[in-house]
Image (spheres, rainbow, N blue to C red):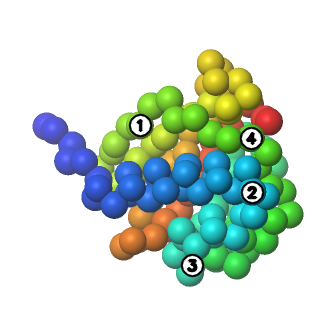
Amino acid sequence: MMIPPPDRNVRQLGSAYVDRHNVSVRSGDFKALSTLFADDGELRFEGIDYGPFLGRESIADAFEAYPPSDELIVLRIDEYEDHVVFAYSWRSRPNVAAGTLHVEAEGALIRRLTIRLLTAT
């Protein structure tokens, strides 16, 4: 049985997250990242002791308190029935897999983003 792909919007949201993440690293302004999340969205980390963060305001505070320091390079995108997974590396170590972004959507916004880190920046 073939698994239907998730709503195309989930993939677009994941791509928008990666784009905004990279722009934010370069500019130092991470406010735009939190606008991708639903009001009651979730940001969870696996591989580091940080979070979880529930709600857009809490997510914005998390990015401000502990901003990412390196850009993401997407290595692979895997689509599942209810979410999309972006495997990534850090720009500073492009040939080393760093983790995965697990994106779940609610309408036009991210409902849950789980970041599974294999290596820290």
Please tell me whether residue 51 is drawn above or below residue 36 in the rendered image: above
Q: What residue is drawn where x is 54% and y is 55%?
A: 17
Q: Residue furthest front?
A: 27
Q: Secondary structure under badge 2?
A: helix
Q: Residue furthest top?
A: 95
| Cβ atoms at labels 4 and 3 below 8 Å apart | no
Residue that label 4 marks: 70
| Front-lying residue, 109 or 54 | 109
Element assignment for label 1:
strand
The one of 112 and 29 positioned closer to us in this rendering: 29
Q: Quadrant of residue 98?
A: top right
Residue 84 locus on image (x, y percent): 41, 47
What's the residue at 46%, 50% (across, down)?
A: 15
Q: Give how far apart the Cα atoms at labels 4 and 2 are.
A: 12 Å
Mark 3 falls on what kind of element?
Answer: strand
The numbered dot on residue 40 is 3
Nearest to N terminus: mark 1 or mark 3:
3
Q: Position of residue 49 (x, y in %)?
A: 81, 49
Q: Amino acid at mark 1?
A: Ile
* Mark 4 or 3, nearer chain start: 3
Q: Amino acid at mark 2?
A: Ser
> Is residue 69 found left or right of 116 in the rendered image?
right
Does residue 15 appear to the left or right of 100 in the view shown? left
Counting residues from the N terminus, which is met first, the one under dot 1 or under dot 4? 4
Q: Secondary structure at mark 4?
A: loop
Q: Nearer the viewer, mark 1 or mark 2?
A: 2
Q: Where in the figure is residue 22, as x and y percent of width and height?
A: 64, 48
User: Disc 1 marks which residue?
Assistant: 77
On the rendered structure, is 111 left or right of 81? right
- Point out the frontmost of discs 4 and 2: 2
